[in-house]
Structure formats: C-alpha cells, structure tokens
Amino acid sequence: MSEAVTRATRTSPGLLASLDPLLREWLPRQRWFAGKGRPVTGFSLVAATELLPPTAKLGLLHLLVRAHQPDVPTHGAMTHPGDCYQLLIGVREALPPRLAPALIGHPDDGPLAGRTVYEALHDPRPAEVLLEALRARARIGELRFERDTRQEIPDGLMPRLMTAEQSNSSIVYGDTFILKLLRRIVPGVNPDLELPLLLAREGCPRVPAPTAWLLADLEGPDDSYVLGVLQPFVKGAADGWELALRELAKGEDFSTQARALGRATAEVHTALARATPPVTLGHAQVRLLVDGMTERLEAAAQAVPTLRTYAPGLRSAFETLGELAAEGRTWNAQRIHGDLHLGQCLRSPSGTWSLIDFEGEPSKSLAERRLPQPVARDVAGMLRSFDYAAHSHEPRVPGWADTCRAAYCTGYAEISGLDPRTDPVLLRAYETDKAVYEVVYEARHRPEWLPVPMAAVHRLSADAAP
Ligand SMILES: Nc1ncnc2c1ncn2[C@@H]1O[C@H](COP(=O)(O)OP(=O)(O)O)[C@@H](O)[C@H]1O
Ligand SMILES: O=P(O)(O)O[C@H]1O[C@H](CO)[C@@H](O[C@H]2O[C@H](CO)[C@@H](O)[C@H](O)[C@H]2O)[C@H](O)[C@H]1O
C-alpha cells in the first residue's frame, strides 16, 4: 500500500516533524510497542485527523504513524516499511496534575510549539469524543465510525483507561462498554472484529457482540484498517487465569469451571463452523502444518539452548502427525480463536463464561491468522493453560491440571460431540507446538517462568518418543 503522506495536509504539514523527537523517546517505552530493542530512526505519517482542532483549549489528533526501524527483518527482497501505530494525541496549554503520567512532551517548534502533547486516552474528554463519534456513526477524514444500530449507546458514560498490561489499549465506559483500540495496525479483515460479528450473527452468547467499531479507509472502503472495537463490558468479571490461581491457592478443585470452559469453547467452535465453511486438510496441507511446527521448533532450539536435548522427542510428535497424513488420514479445519488460554476467558458474577480477544497471534500475518485450522489448536492452548496454572503454584497440587484437562475435554465433547482426546496425535502435536512457542515467549519476556513450559517440554518429548 502506498504511503498516504498527503493526508497529513488536513493538519499542518510540519506536525510530524514537531512530534518526531518526542515520539522517538516515548513510543518505545509503551507496553504495546511491538518493535522493542531496535532503535526508531524516524516516522512517516500514514494519516492524520483532527478530532478536536489542536488550536483549541483542548485539541485531539488521531494519527496513524509508521515507525522506521531499519534492522526489521526483511521479507524476501522487500525492505520492511516499519510497523504502523494508532496514536491519540491530546494537545493542551498545560497538563493538570492528574494527567502528568500521560505526558509525551513539549514540541520545540512547528504548529504545536509551546503546547503540551500527551496520550489522550488518559483524559476523559477525548475518550468521550470517540464514543460520541461511534454513536453518531461519524465520518471524519479517512476515519469511519460504525455501529450496530440495534444496540443503544447511552449518554454520559464515564470513561476510564484500563491499566492492565495489554498489547492494545482499552477504555471502559461506565462499566457498560469497553473500547479496544488496536495499536499496531495492519490493513485487511481483522479477526478481532470479524469473528465476534460472525458469532453475534449466529446468536452465540459466549462472545460479547460488537456494538460499534472504528475503521480507517486509507485506500477506499475496500481496504480498511480496523482501528477499534466497542463491545459490552462484562461487569465484575474475573478471568480464567485469576480464578484458577485463586482456586489453587485455596486447594480447591477447578474441574466444574474447566468443564464449563470446555462447553463454552465448543459452543464458539460450533457457531464458527456454521458461520464459515469448514475445510478438509489432506496430506499436502498437513505436511505444511508439520513443516511449520518443525521449523518453529528448530528456530526455538537455536534461540533457547536448553530446548536442544528435547528436540528429537518433540520433533517426533510432529512426524507422527505427518505419517498419519501420509497414510491418507484427513482432518477437519475451520475458523478458530487462534490464541486461546485462560486469560482470554471471562466469567461473569452470575457464572457465565465469555471468550474475548479474537485477534489471534499478533506476530502472524492477518492472512495466516484467518486460515481454517483444526479446533485441536484452541483446545491445546487451554490444556497448556491448566498446566501453566498448576506449575506456577507452590506447593503443587498433585493431579490438579490432569483433572482440569479431562473435565475441559468432557465439557467440549458434551457440546460438540467430539472428544479432543480421541485424536491424541493431533492434540499432542498442537500441545508441543504451543509449549515450544511458550519456551521462546518466556525466555524473551519472563525468564523466571521458563521452567513452566520446560516441564511440559520434558513430558511431551517423552510421550512422543518411539
Ligand atoms: N467484554 C469485556 N468485558 C470485561 N472486560 C473485558 C472485556 N473485553 C476485554 N476485557 C478486559 O480487557 C483485557 C484486555 O482485553 P484483550 O481483548 O485481551 O486486549 P489485548 O489484545 O490488548 O490483550 C482483558 O484481559 C479483560 O480483562
Ligand atoms: O497476552 P497474550 O494473549 O498476547 O499472550 C501472550 O502472553 C501470555 C501471558 O500473559 C502467554 O500465556 C502463557 O502464560 C499464561 C499465564 O500468564 C498462560 O495462561 C498461558 O497458557 C501461557 O501460554 C501467551 O503464551 C503469550 O502469547
């Protein structure tokens, strides 16, 4: 896609130059910045829209900005243009003390010289502007605010920015709605909006139905970027990870909840199978799957040396799957959640489970994330999560993870008619792939957690050995 620098003329042409030194310092410090560890050498403006004029007492700029990082891995002969980020920039004379943590800085020159710029999502008024635009289905520049007109968006909901460690940023409005603003932006159909919309259409109550959404039509309405999704807020909810740890701490059994989670997952899968046509994976497709798993293992073993002694056992989990495919076995594949774990499951105070965050693995391309896959991949993600909870708790509660894993599969089978345990080769391959991913994730982000997936690596490599 071509750089749409001309769109910047809607605001002053010197805008980005005046923000550049401030953003170079501020952006890499943000939790959601995907290019950590590599210097940002500059920015280009993809789109800039004034939501409130920057000359007013309170200004609000919506920016899509490409961050240049020259040592980003290249794809083939193409140089990676850099990731595109969504920024909401507030502009004031001075920041009130409550907004001090949101400060980005004071531009020295250009159209914003002498003013204070800050992360606008911390400020209730700019957050209200976004909700008002969604309610009004506003079109402002390339920004298209859309909504499901059957759902009401009342006035006067107090906004607050969520403080959770997130890959994106979310604003909660009066405990009624939550607006997730995606930070790293890619063109195309984003499953975080696509799948909840499909599930809502299927009447599946396990996923909050999108109330409104924000798009950017940079190359016209057929090439939109999804920038945000507003959905009903599940008030007083706890996520599955918190609940599992709470029960473990009390020495309580979690199997009733695990079974309910299995049922909820199967409800989502059966609704997705109705909404999008499932496909059959034959030898060639499974070979690709197995090759992908094997390549990820090789790369992981390069990056994390402790994995190397286990590699032959782990590899055989993938090879066994490839052998079944070579013998003519086929598998069903369909759209799935793609990144399912206990943290993606919310339990309401009345005890109902919802699944959230259908974005898939953010490091993969949208095309990859939207491919039909065996449901075993989501199931394996959850089975790993029960294992994670059990291994992150001291003292260990013997059998806790196994009981949860069995209950989850039982619940799954009650709804779908398919017990994931009846295909142990596929399940083991996906569990192994996930554990390998987790080893790399923990080595990179939380080295003290590395023993948790390594325990699974130990078990899975032994299981798969001939
Ligand atoms: N509909 C909802 N109701 C209540 N809380 C929610 C809802 N959706 C998300 N959350 C909360 O917001 C957090 C982040 O949401 P998520 O979609 O996982 O964002 P990210 O992709 O940035 O991690 C979740 O862990 C959960 O605590
Ligand atoms: O938060 P994301 O959905 O982007 O997922 C990433 O971070 C997760 C940790 O927050 C990580 O999940 C792993 O740890 C969880 C406990 O903290 C556990 O429930 C998961 O089963 C385990 O995979 C996830 O792998 C990573 O992609």
Image (tube, helix red, strand yellow):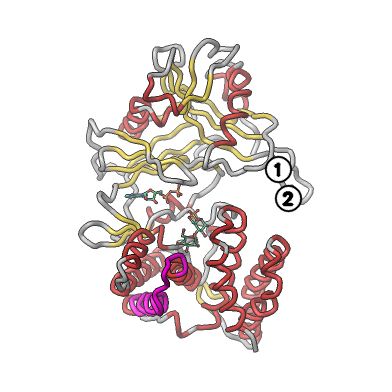
Closer to the camera in the image, 62 or 463: 463
Q: Is residue 278 visible?
A: no
Amino acid type of the residue that numbered disc 2 sits on in the rendered structure: His
Q: Which residue is mark 2?
A: 75
Image coordinates for residue 416, horizontal then vertical, percent: 36, 76
Q: Earlier in the sequence, mark 1 or mark 2?
A: 2
SS for callout 2: loop
Q: Is residue 151 visible?
A: yes
Image coordinates for residue 93, horizontal then vertical, percent: 44, 12
Vertical relation: 270 (above or below) 442 = below
Amino acid type of the residue that numbered disc 1 sits on in the rendered structure: His
Residue 398 covered by magenta stretch: yes
**Residue 150 falls in which quadrant of the image?**
top left
Quadrant where the image shows the N terminus: top right
Residue 80's tag is 1
Furthest residue in direction front, as rendered: 395
